[in-house]
Structure formats: C-alpha cells, structure tokens
Image (cartoon, grey):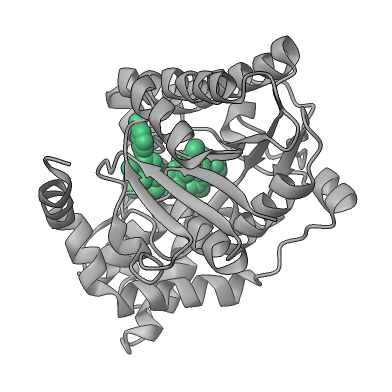
Amino acid sequence: MQRNILITGGAGFIGSHLVRHFVRKYPEYRIVNYDKLTYAGNLENLKDVENEPNYVFVKGDICDEAALAAVFAKYDIDGVIHLAAESHVDRSITDPLAFARTNVLGTLALLQAAKTAWKGEYEGKRFYHVSTDEVYGALGFDGSLFTEKTPYAPHSPYSASKASSDHFVRAFHDTYGFPCVVSNCSNNYGPYQFPEKLIPLFVNNIRHSKPLPVYGKGENVRDWLYVGDHCKAIDLIFHKGVSGETYNIGGNNEWSNIDLIRLMIRITDEELGRPSGTSDSLITFVKDRAGHDLRYAIDSSKLQRELGWKPEMPFERGIRETVRWYLDNGSWLDNVTSGAYIEYYEKMYSGR
Ligand code: NAD
Ligand code: DAU
C-alpha cells in the first residue's frame, strides 16, 4: 500500500534510525523527514539513505504553521510519526522556554496542521506521538514499574514539556476523534546519539582520557533499550496500535549509572587495547543534576501481549557494538562536538 509518512525530527538520534528503518523496509511508502536541524539534527546520520527514491528531506520547524501546511499539501501526508523535540534534560534546566516552544507549542502546531489537512476524514490516517517514560516521574528502589496507568508526575522542564504534549495529543483524540497513538519509551542507546547524553559523552571522554562527570553518587537507575528495538516497536504500534491507546516501551534492563559507567570503561579500554583499569581514575563525582529522578523502569507487558513486541538486542552485545561504533566513527564524534556540521548544513540550506 502506498503511504506518505511525515517523520519529524528524523535527523536526530532515534529519528535517523527510524527513517532508515522505514525507507528500507517500506519502499512503497514515501518518507518525508521534516527537521529544523538544530544542534541535535545532523544529515550525516542519513547519508546512506539520502538518495533513495522514497526519501525526501524538508528543513522546517514544527512551530511554523505555514511550512507545515505546505508540507501536508505537497506530499499528501496520511501518517505522522512525531519525534522532533528538545530532548536533553540538562539543557531544559538552563533554558526551559525552548522546551515549551518546541515540545508543547510545536506539537500543538503539528496536531493542528494534521487536523486541518485531514478535514475530519480520518480513515487511513494516523498521528503517532513518540514520548518518554520521564513523564511518569521517578520510582523508588522498591521494584515497582511504570505502567500505562501510572499517573503523570514530571519533575524536569523537559519531562513537563513532554507530559504537556502527550496531554494535547490525547485531548485531540477525545475532543475531535483524532486518530492518534502515544508511546512512552525508556532510555535509548546506540549509534548517532549526540554526545551530551551519558553513553556517547562518556565513550568520547574515555577516548580522550577526559574526566567522566558522574552526577551525585551515580546511584540513579535507568532502563536501557537498543534504539533498533525502539524503532521496531514504533513500526508495530504505527501499523497495528489501537487509536487513542498508549503503549509503554522498555528494555527490562535496569542499570545504576555507576555500574553502567564501570561497564563502559571496561569495554572501551578493551576495544582501545588499553590495559584493564586504565580509565577507572577518570570517574569524577560532581554536583547532582537538579531534580534528578532516582529510577526509571518500564512495564512493557501491554505492548508484548497485544502486539507481540519484545526487545531483541542482548545488552552486552548492544553496548559493545555501540562503543565500537563510536570508536570507529571518531570523525563523526569530532564533527558534532566541534559543531562543524551546523555551519555546513546552514550554508547548504540558506536561500532555499
Ligand atoms: P534528538 O535530540 O537526538 O533529536 C531531536 C531532533 O528533532 C533533531 O534532529 C532536531 O533537529 C529536531 N528538532 C528539534 N526541534 C525541532 C523543531 N522545532 N522543528 C523540527 N525539528 C526539530 O532526540 P532523540 O533522543 O532522538 O529523541 C527523539 C524523540 O524521542 C523525542 O521526542 C524524545 O522526547 C523521545 N524519546 C527519546 C528517548 C531517548 O532515550 N533518547 C527515549 C524516549 C523518548
Ligand atoms: O528516559 C528516557 C529519556 O532518557 C529521554 O526522554 C531523554 O530524551 C534522554 O535524554 C534520556 O534522559 P536521561 O536524563 O535519563 O539521559 P542522560 O543521558 O542525560 O542521563 C542518563 C543518566 O546519567 C541520568 O541519571 C543522568 C546521568 N548523567 C548524565 C550525564 C550527561 C551523569 O551522571 N553524568 C552526565 O554527564
């Protein structure tokens, strides 16, 4: 079946994996990647699919209502998978307004654009909002998990903005019968993640023998999922999820930060051919993140039971392959940390 799918934020970390997955798996679909190319968006991430006949890139802001209307009309969009967002918690602490603009107002502008373009004819249409487990707040060390029924309790400006966007999506469903699904996923890891996030930042620092800033005591727990498994879940939910429903996605793979950091140090030293323990002394305990959520852990049994998804990548293999990828792609890391790609793509798209 021919479909025209708008993927927002497709030049970012998860978005670029998702665009590649859809472009390759569904040659009969046209995939329109709509991305503002902020510091986190990098078209280098999609070099291997940029010339595919079913792929189109449009540089644009999800807050720009006129640009969105033009894209919906030009490409006859019938499906949206919305990932564009400001995504880094630490940045949200210093610049919360940027998160409200993109994550809240941008999501609302995108919902409005789809609603206007689809004119109430929702047969065959779908709006998929990709969200985070951080909307549920923080768990204690008591073994409980986030389910789809866990009440929202965001703590950071990032998670508050994502929570707000989730509410707008559901409000469109309840008010207008708008065809939408939401998923809330745990921490992703894999290639092409911007090196401000824990795993790529630390691999890059170990590579350069720079300090590894561990927030607080390093006791916070995250539930890590390989990005490819997230993309397979999104594919399933996009095609088979029930309109109006929410699906939790998680790795069933909890790690305290300090244990994960020690594992990364061991693997990175091994892969660099350094003697065991070389980088242990890089661990540097620093002031804790403000409002730092203690533990996230997802119960994804609804998705497993109803749609047959399960995480496939074993963590030991996924993390080693991820470390290897960053070490093999040092020029990608150098390019994004220097910001050189921003200037390059700004020049390429200026005047268009
Ligand atoms: P990212 O920061 O790597 O990428 C975000 C992308 O959105 C970039 O390409 C950026 O250029 C684009 N973008 C930002 N503002 C935009 C705007 N105003 N208009 C158009 N494009 C814009 O993010 P990510 O880690 O890939 O996360 C993608 C989505 O998945 C986000 O919505 C995030 O909340 C959600 N999520 C992420 C994780 C995770 O672990 N990374 C887990 C669960 C959910
Ligand atoms: O849970 C899903 C979320 O995971 C996504 O919605 C977010 O977009 C994504 O950024 C991620 O949020 P976290 O805050 O969990 O990820 P981050 O990589 O920033 O941090 C992971 C943990 O490591 C967290 O407990 C903070 C800690 N940390 C992070 C950095 C960058 C450190 O100790 N030192 C650091 O330098």
* Left or right of 136 on screen, residue 38: left
**Residue 167 figure quarter:** top right
The number of discs equals 0
Image quarter where the C terminus lies is top left
Towards the viewer: 117 or 106? 117
Asked if one can make out residue 257 in the rendered structure from this viewpoint, the answer is yes
At a point 24% along the width and 58% down the height, the residue shown is 211
Q: Residue 159, percent across and down?
A: 50, 27
Q: Residue 209, percent across and down?
A: 21, 69
* Left or right of 330 on screen, residue 316: right
Q: Residue furthest right?
A: 305
Image quarter where the N terminus lies is bottom right
Q: Is residue 327 above or below residue 295?
A: below
At a point 50% along the width and 22% down the height, the residue shown is 113
Asked if one can make out residue 217 in the rendered structure from this viewpoint, the answer is no
* Left or right of 114 on screen, residue 352: left
Q: Is residue 287 above or below residue 280?
A: above
Q: Quadrant of ligand 2?
A: top left
Q: Residue 240, percent across and down?
A: 79, 47
**Residue 178 figure quarter:** top right
Q: Is residue 18 above or below residue 306?
A: below
Towards the viewer: 320 or 85? 85
Q: Is residue 42 above or below residue 291?
A: below
